[in-house]
Amino acid sequence: MLINRFPKMAALQNKRALSLGYDKDLAKAIAIAEAVKYAIFKNIHKKKQKEKAALKTQVPLKIDNKTFALFKLQAFNGLPFVGNKTYTSKEYDKALYGRFGKAIAQKIEEWAKDIIYQCPKEYLENESKFFNECWKVHRDENPLI
């Protein structure tokens, strides 16, 4: 079975957030928000200028840029906020466990845990280093092998 990049990014970001001290539910919320953020970036890059303008929406006034600054995520009411939506651990569970089932989701998470274990803390604390040194080199691996 081929696992696309979205669930792998989510699992990796979950383990990253856990290793940086976030609680279980918030780590999952951060993880799914990060995966969505990267999917948006990838899709915006591929779209025409006209379509980019259509993606711009009004943002609520009480956006917090400090809570998840390490992840370069905004927060709204204490939750990660991406694409004009807040994310919780439920979206993470749905993306991994709901889509793949328990056994495969656990294998994806084990794969992510092994990668995070190998990444220096300085990479985990730096979005650019994390992306280039921890994600890019592993993103096309099959976690089921």
Image (tube, rainbow, N blue to C red):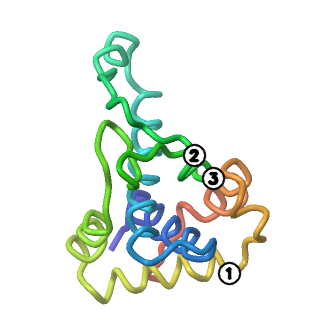
In the visual, does 27 lie left or right of 61? right
Q: Which residue is mark 1?
A: 117
Q: Residue at x 69, y 64 (%)?
A: 124
Q: Type of residue at label 2? A: Lys
Mark 2: few, some, or many residues within 10 Å (few <14, many ≥20)? few
Amino acid at the residue labelled 1: Tyr
Residue at horizontal 48%, vertical 61%? 9
| Alpha carbons under labels 1 and 2: distance apart | 26 Å
Q: Secondary structure at mark 1?
A: helix
Distance between mark 1 and mark 3 Cα atoms? 19 Å
Taking the image as shown, residue 20 lies to the left or right of residue 100, namely right
Tags 2 and 3 in contact by the CB under 8 Å rule?
no
Residue under circle 3?
Answer: 70
- Residue drawn at x 55%, y 61% as measured from the top left: 139
Do the numbered discs 1 and 2 sit on residues whose CB atoms are within 8 Å?
Answer: no
Residue density around tag 1, few if under 14, some if 14–19, many if 20 or more, within 10 Å: few
Foreground: disc 1 or disc 3: 3
Q: State the image coordinates of residue 76 (x, y, percent, origin top left).
A: 37, 46
Mark 2: which secondary structure?
Answer: strand
At which x and y percent is residue 60? 32, 31
Residue 62 lies left or right of residue 111; in this view the side is left
Q: Nearer the viewer, mark 1 or mark 2?
A: 2
- Residue 48 image-quadrant placement: top left
Q: Which of the two labelled residues, at mark 1 and mark 3, occupies the earlier sequence position?
A: 3
- Label for residue 66? 2
**Amino acid marked by disc 3:** Leu
In the picture, the disc for residue 125 is none
Residue 52 lies, with reference to residue 29, above or below; the image says above
What's the CA distance linking mark 2 and mark 3? 8 Å
Question: In the figure, residue 29 lies in which quadrant?
Answer: bottom left
